[in-house]
Image: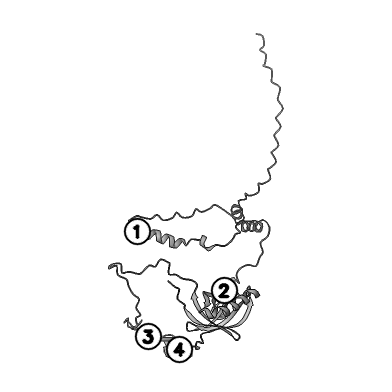
């Protein structure tokens, strides 16, 4: 089945404009879905909005948005008022700047999307923008109204198309200092650092996501198959706890290096044997 575009519009660079389509780059459709059921009847249950004071259900057409201005006091905003206040969509991704590929902080990156030309007439202009960015090793910073919100986008060449990442605004990202201010700035040196570097070197390689298994999904699938077959599934054994007593010992064990042997102690000096005493001659009996 063909992938459906989430949005269609135009990619604009100066006076150059080409029709494009936006597609989701991630999907949860292949995950195992579990439903909430009524234990007594086996029927699915549904979520319902109720008035927290009266406990009565509130129908969808009676629901409005509200901003809390004081405790239990709300400023009501209708959907019409919200729609009028939101910037109107121009259906255009307008590239405002280009920056070095390594300049952007990953903390600000949001959901990924693919951008592709919409129709054959757009392919040449699309390829021109894509290849120019690739040649200059830059990413584009663009703005548009997407999914009813004003968005900042990062766009970069990806294979034959363009990868788009929705970016978070500055107010949405918590300053790192709030978390890291208590982390000591002391530097580790000596054997511990050398061992850690050795472990890193032994684990260097290439990243291939297909080599990683979603163990939760696999375990859930095995559980479902076992229950369908009337079998019990054994819980995995808990990991064995090591008997490492220090950070240095943990590094040595991870690196497969034994602790250095202590210097052998000098053998204790042998005690000199006591000089032998001469045996006493037996006393002679006097002649009677």
Mark 1 near mark 4, Cβ–Cβ under 8 Å?
A: no
Q: Position of residue 121 (x, y in %)?
A: 53, 81
* Front residue of this view, candidates 89 and 284: 89
Q: Earlier in the sequence, mark 3 or mark 2?
A: 3
Label 2 CA crowd tier, 10 Å (few <14, some 14–19, many 20+): few
What distance separates the C-alpha of mark 1 from that of mark 4? 49 Å
The circle on residue 227 is 1
Q: Is residue 205 above or below residue 287?
A: below
What distance separates the C-alpha of mark 4 from that of mark 3? 16 Å
What distance separates the C-alpha of mark 3 from that of mark 1? 42 Å
Q: Earlier in the sequence, mark 3 or mark 1?
A: 3
The circle on residue 79 is none
Report if residue 168 is visible in the image.
Answer: no
Please name the residue that numbered disc 3 is placed on: 63
* Front residue of this view, candidates 171 and 273: 171
Element under disc 1: helix
* Front residue of this view, candidates 77 and 266: 77
């Amino acid at each position: 089945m063909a992938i459906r575009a989430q949005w269609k519009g135009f990619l604009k660079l100066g006076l150059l404009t080409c029709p494009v389509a936006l597609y989701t780059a991630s999907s949860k459709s292949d995950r195992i879905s579990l439903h909430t059921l009524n234990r007594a009847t086996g029927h699915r249950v549904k979520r319902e909005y109720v008035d927290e004071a009266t406990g009565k259900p509130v129908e969808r057409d009676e629901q409005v948005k509200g901003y809390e201005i004081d405790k239990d006091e709300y400023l009501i905003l209708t959907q019409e008022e919200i729609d009028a206040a939101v910037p109107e969509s121009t259906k255009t991704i307008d590239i405002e700047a280009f920056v070095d590929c390594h300049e952007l902080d990953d903390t600000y990156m949001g959901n990924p999307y693919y951008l592709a030309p919409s129709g054959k007439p757009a392919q040449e202009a699309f390829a021109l923008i894509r290849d120019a960015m690739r040649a200059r090793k830059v990413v584009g910073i663009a703005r548009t109204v997407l999914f009813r919100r004003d968005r900042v986008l990062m766009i970069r060449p990806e294979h034959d198309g363009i990868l788009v990442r929705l970016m978070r605004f500055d107010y949405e990202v918590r300053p790192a200092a709030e978390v890291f201010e208590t982390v000591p700035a002391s530097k580790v040196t000596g054997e511990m650092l050398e061992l850690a570097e050795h472990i890193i070197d032994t684990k260097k390689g290439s990243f291939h996501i297909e080599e990683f298994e979603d163990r939760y999904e696999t375990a859930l699938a095995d559980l479902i198959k076992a229950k369908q077959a009337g079998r019990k599934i054994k819980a995995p054994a808990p990991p064995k706890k090591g008997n490492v007593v220090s950070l240095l010992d943990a590094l040595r064990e991870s690196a497969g290096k034994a602790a250095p042997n202590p210097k052998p102690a000098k053998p204790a000096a042998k005690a000199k044997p006591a000089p032998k005493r001469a045996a006493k001659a037996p006393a002679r009996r006097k002649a009677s």
